[in-house]
């Protein structure tokens, strides 16, 4: 079988671009050459620009690869991700060139032999299906310019090998993993004393003047959220319908809602769908609606609150919200956020002012008690019953509370620490004993070792990219800008 691979080596070399490094395939070797006008330059790597035109072209190709339409390719977020990928590939390409890495044809062939799509082209008698192979090349827009594609695939494999070698950073010593596991298993006996704002609410009574002043200064807190009134259409697959027929309808649905973006009616009429309406839709979705509601989908919501939908009243892209379900919507009326009058929010204003005043009293009481305990931490009166906690078993301690308790020096016990709970009050913790468990959980040890390994690899790769970014003199020329409404380009 491998003799056949070698026999077709020249053609097989071309296909590597399809599978080894898909992101690089998306951009192509041609993106490593040529200069454009400076006003179109976004970033320069080693003096060579990445242009706005390259980003737009790469975005369109990638959108097509993932089955999306042009609206996806035009979004700023999508194009920024494409630019980031282009930049990373350029930096890696610079590193490969400067390191003078080499890859032989045998290595390329071995890589091809591991690709399922290539193995599938062998017939039962062991012969290779040239026609299918050439069809695969043609379907991906590849011709038989051997030297160009050989250079492209070889470059991709070098980058792939370089990235893998950097990511395979090994832990310097297993001792580090053991130390981390020991720190996570070490237990401390802890008592707590809470000072909650709710316990001090009875001691506060804000005046009308205080309430009005708070409202005036914090009016944004009492703002009604923006919302939209929308129309939408839903295409659902009929279980009795042929899959190919539905796919044709789905394509029509996506194309018509995009091409005739000023209205949903043409699409609805063509596909015999009803135009439905929804008022008062916020960024949180339709109030009280089930999770499978067409407008509850995050992608639909995001599209409806985009500038394109709000300012230009254009249909959103067709979104598949569930298997066999596609949705497109458009904004009919946009209602901006508004500051609510004081009378409508007076009760909420008083609640917030009272809560903040009570929290200040709780924090003051905690500070006074903490000052006393620091002088004599052996005093345990007022504390809750002791519990044993560790980083592996933190009980109800999280975040800063756990960090502060676990950072208390074992040479200074008993000891106390005070931790503020924003919006609630404060809690004082008292630690008087430390112990090591008799045995650890091997599964937890292994998981922690893997986490340390992953963090080490990420850190190594980040440092590697930072070094080569500096070496390649990466310079940002112009920021990536949103496309104008008229650019479909």
Image: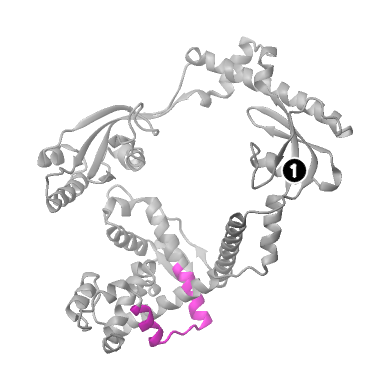
* 298 left or right of 219 in image: left
User: In this picture, is 344 found above or below 86?
Assistant: above
| Residue 138, x across and y down, in percent | 21, 73
* 412 left or right of 76 in image: right
Between 272 and 224, the one lying in front of the other is 272
Q: Which residue is mark 1?
A: 188
| Residue 426, x across and y down, in percent | 70, 29
User: In this picture, is 381 found above or below 159?
Assistant: above
Q: Is residue 429 visible?
A: yes
Q: Quadrant of residue 106?
A: bottom left
Residue at image point 73% right, 31% down: 192
User: Could you say whether the residue bearing mark 1 is in a helix, strand or loop?
Assistant: strand
Q: Magenta span covers which residues?
A: 89-113
Residue at image point 58% right, 17% down: 351
Task: Judge whether residue 146 is colored magenta.
Answer: no
Q: Which quarter shows the C terminus?
A: bottom left
Question: How is the rendered protein coloured?
Answer: one colour
| Residue 240, x across and y down, in percent | 12, 44
């Amino acid at each position: 079988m491998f003799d056949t691979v070698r026999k077709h080596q020249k053609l097989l070399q071309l296909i590597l671009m399809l599978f080894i490094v898909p992101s690089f395939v998306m951009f192509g070797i041609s993106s490593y050459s040529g200069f454009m006008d400076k006003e179109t330059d976004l970033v320069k790597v080693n003096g060579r620009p990445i242009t706005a035109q390259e980003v737009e072209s790469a975005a369109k190709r990638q959108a097509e690869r993932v089955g999306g339409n042009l609206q996806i390719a035009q979004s700023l977020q999508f194009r920024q991700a494409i630019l980031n990928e282009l930049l990373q590939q350029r930096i890696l390409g610079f590193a490969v060139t400067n390191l003078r890495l080499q890859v032989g044809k045998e290595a390329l062939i071995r890589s091809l032999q591991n690709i399922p799509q290539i193995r599938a082209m062998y017939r039962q008698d062991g012969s290779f299906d040239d026609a299918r192979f050439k069809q695969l090349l043609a379907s991906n827009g590849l011709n038989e310019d051997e030297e160009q594609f050989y250079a492209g695939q070889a470059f991709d494999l070098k980058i792939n090998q370089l990235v893998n070698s950097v990511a395979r950073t090994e832990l310097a010593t297993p001792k580090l993993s053991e130390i981390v596991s020991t720190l996570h298993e070490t237990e401390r006996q802890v008592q707590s004393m809470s000072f909650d704002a709710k316990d001090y609410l009875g001691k506060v009574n804000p005046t009308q003047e205080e309430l009005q002043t708070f409202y005036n200064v914090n009016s944004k807190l009492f703002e009604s959220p923006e919302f939209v009134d929308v129309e939408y259409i839903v295409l659902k697959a009929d279980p009795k319908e042929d899959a190919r027929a539905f796919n044709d309808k789905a394509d029509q649905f996506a194309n018509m809602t995009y091409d005739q973006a000023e209205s949903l009616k043409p699409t609805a009429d063509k596909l015999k769908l009803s135009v439905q309406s929804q008022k008062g839709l916020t960024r949180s979705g339709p109030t009280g609606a089930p999770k499978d509601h067409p407008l509850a989908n995050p992608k639909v919501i995001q599209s409806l609150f985009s500038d394109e939908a709000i300012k230009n009243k254009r249909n959103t892209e067709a979104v598949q919200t569930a298997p066999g379900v596609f949705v497109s919507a458009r904004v009919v009326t946009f209602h901006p956020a508004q500051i609510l009058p004081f009378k409508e929010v007076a009760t909420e204003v008083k609640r917030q002012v009272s809560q903040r005043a009570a929290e200040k009293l709780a924090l003051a009481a905690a500070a006074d008690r903490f000052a006393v305990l620091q002088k004599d931490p052996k005093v345990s009166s007022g504390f809750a019953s002791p519990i044993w906690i560790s980083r592996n078993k933190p009980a109800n301690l999280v975040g800063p509370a756990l960090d502060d308790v676990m950072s208390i020096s074992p040479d200074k016990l008993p000891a106390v620490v005070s931790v503020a709970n924003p919006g609630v009050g404060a809690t004082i913790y008292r630690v008087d004993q430390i112990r090591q468990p008799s045995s650890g959980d091997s599964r937890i040890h292994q998981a922690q070792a893997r986490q340390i390994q992953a963090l080490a690899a990420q850190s190594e790769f980040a440092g590697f990219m930072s070094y080569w970014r500096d070496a390649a003199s990466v310079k940002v020329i112009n920021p990536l800008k949103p496309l104008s409404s008229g650019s479909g380009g």
